[in-house]
Image (cartoon, grey):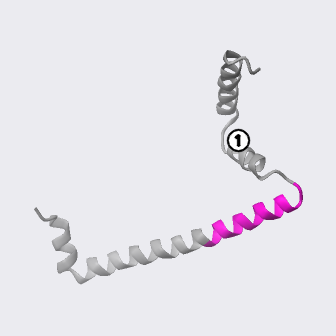
Amino acid sequence: MSNPGMADVADSGIAAEELKQFIERIERLEEEIVGLNADKKEVYAEAKGRGFDVKTIKHVIALRRKDFAERQEEEAILELYLQALGMA
């Protein structure tokens, strides 16, 4: 069973060109992501070299992404679990 949309792409130079443009944009973005990830890795290495704990920095960044109420709820659940395990 063939996909009817595939025939449209194959038959139309405009659709094929548009598809190519989408793919090329995505490829450029993926290249940018690779570069940004390399930059981020360098920043973490620099922080580590200055004596900061990278694992903790990553945790702080994750916490900063969340709003206050969400953080409070997670902390309350964590505290409850720790108490249940006798770790509090």
Could you tell me what secondary structure mostly forms the magenta stretch? helix
For image coordinates 72% across by 44% down, the residue present is 59
Give the image quarter of residue 45: bottom right
Reading the image, the residue beneath label 1 is 63
Position of residue 69 in the picture relative to residue 6 (left or right) = right
Nearest the eye: 42 or 5: 42
The relative height of residue 68 versus residue 18 in the rendered view (above or below) is: above
Amino acid marked by disc 1: Leu
Quadrant of the rendering where the N terminus is positioned = bottom left
The x and y percentages for residue 18 are: 33, 77
Q: Position of residue 62 (x, y in %)?
A: 68, 45
- For residue 39: magenta? yes
Q: Residue furthest right?
A: 50
In the displayed structure, would residue 49 be above or below residue 86?
Answer: below
Outermost residue, left side = 1
Q: Is residue 47 above or below residue 28?
A: above
Q: Give the side of residue 85 with respect to residue 34, left or right.
A: right
- Name the residue furthest front: 86
Estimate the x, y position of residue 48 in percent, counting from the top left: 82, 58
Q: Quadrant of residue 65?
A: top right
Residue 52, percent from left and from top? 85, 53
Please state, as top left, top right, bottom left or bottom right, where the C terminus lies in the image: top right
Which portion, as a residue range, is magenta?
Answer: 35-51
Q: Residues within 10 Å of mark 1 (few under 14, many from 20)?
A: few
Name the residue: 65% across, 29% down. Answer: 74
Q: Quick check: is 63 in the magenta stretch? A: no
